[in-house]
Amino acid sequence: MIYIIAAIAIVLTHTVCFAAMTERKYSAGKTALIYSLFCVVFVGVAIVIYSLLGTRIDFDRIIILYYLVTIVISFCTFMYASADPVCKKIFLFVSYSNIFTVLLYISSILHNAFFSNFSESAAVYARNIIRTILYIPALWIYLRFLRPYVREMQGSQKKTWYSLSLVSFLFLIVFVLFLTDFSHIGEYTLFFAIAFLLYCSVLWIVFGTLQFMLQKNKAELIVQSTKYLSQQLENAKENERIAKTTRHDFRHHNRNIETMLKEGKIKEAIRYLEQYNESLKEVDPKEFCPNITVNAILSGFYRKAHNEGISVSVEADVQQETPISDLDFVAMLSNLLENAVNGCKKCNSGGEIKVHIRTVADKTVIVCSNSCAADLTIEDHMLRNRGIGIDSIVLTIRKYNGDIRYSLEDGTLTACVILKP
């Protein structure tokens, strides 16, 4: 019975920590259901394995079997419930395993130091209570200082994440070796302390690396914004040039109309004015919505797509005032539309882009569909191969507690973004 209670304490601790590390993939209700099933399966496995204590299988083998099975269950649950890329999820899980092993060792040391005269059942309770208490400051430190960095980091730097995971896994092997002999665990305290200090140093370097990666991502976003603003400046220069040409030509048009009217050519003058009005419509900028920034983004990419021979359909109802900042609209819309144009160009057949932006209640919904190449792969509603553009979109969406889902059907890729300002 004591081992079942210990298993319940462990799985509850795992669940709380996984929830803190998880970038939620599903709704809150479904995520809660997943972790509830995880707890049930975890405890069920513990009951089955510890029922073997009365058999000929020795205690050490049962413990090893228990840890191996529960680690696999925990790993599969975390990988399934989190929306982060695989490389990042592996790093987080291995790092958590390290912390769990370290706290397990420390709780055993403290138990041997202060409660060595306890019975076997009391010892199990004491170690679990100590470990749970130790989890509280560890979890607070992660939530307060580390999680902001981890959550902002995307999975585009796969080699870096896998390298960090490998280093963490090597330390995990070292920490597990310290736990192979509980009866002499106190004899290795000095070596364990040295290994732990080395691991802390590595973590310091790791999170320094993460911070560097974060700054690199932000720098790339600034480059993208600068590129967009430069494009807008070029558009403004082009519009000014057209305006100057129009003003220059306007005097000639007035002179021609004046001459026609003086000569009594009324019908010719009217036809001339109609032709002139039609020519003005061709150079008028597209007006998609009242929001200046969104309209400028849509106009720029509308013109770019048409120059590439791509058919474009746009519907937008973004108002002048919106809780979404202009820079965030730039980060999302510019990347979505640029990816759509690039996707159509890879088809080598013109292609088509459809953009719908709607405000529903307190949510802003952006749906962008485009023709795409046949080699795209969708995993968990996200493109398998994603670059800095998609990472920029995801980073912006998280600021508004939003979500993005990709779908692929009949050669058309659709991205659906929901923002909850």
Image (cartoon, helix red, strand yellow):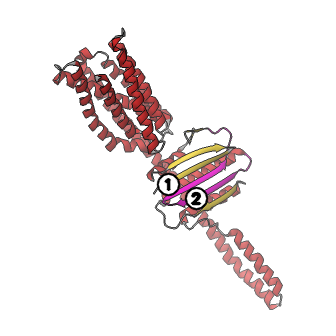
The percent coordinates of residue 395 (x first, y second) are 47, 48
Q: Which residues are magenta?
A: 348-377
Which residue is disc 2 drawn over? 357
Left or right of residue 310: residue 330:
left
Q: Note whether 298 is above or below 131 in the view shown.
A: below
Secondary structure of the residue carrying numbered label 1: strand
Dividing the picture into quarters, in which one does residue 280 lie? bottom right
How packed mark 2 is, by other alpha carbons closer than 10 Å (few <14, some 14-19, many 20 or more), is some
Dividing the picture into quarters, in which one does residue 135 lie? top left
The percent coordinates of residue 331 (x first, y second) are 52, 53
Which residue is disc 1 drawn over? 419
Circle 1: residue type: Leu
Q: Check if mark 1's residue and mark 2's residue have beta carbons within 8 Å.
A: no
The percent coordinates of residue 372 (x first, y second) are 67, 45
Q: Nearer the viewer, residue 71 or 298?
A: 71
Q: Nearer the viewer, residue 134 or 282?
A: 134
Q: Does residue 142 appear anywhere in the picture?
A: yes
Magenta segment includes 70: no
Secondary structure of the residue carrying numbered label 2: strand
SS assignment for the magenta stretch, majority: strand
| Disc 1 from disc 2: Cα separation | 11 Å
The percent coordinates of residue 418 (x first, y second) are 52, 53
Q: Nearer the viewer, residue 117 or 297?
A: 117
Residue at 29% x, 36% y: name it: 138
Magenta segment includes 360: yes
Q: Nearer the viewer, residue 158 or 222?
A: 158
Circle 2: residue type: Ile
| Quadrant containing the N terminus in the rendered view | top left
Mark 1 or mark 2, earlier in chain: 2
Q: Note whether 352 is above or below 245 in the view shown.
A: above
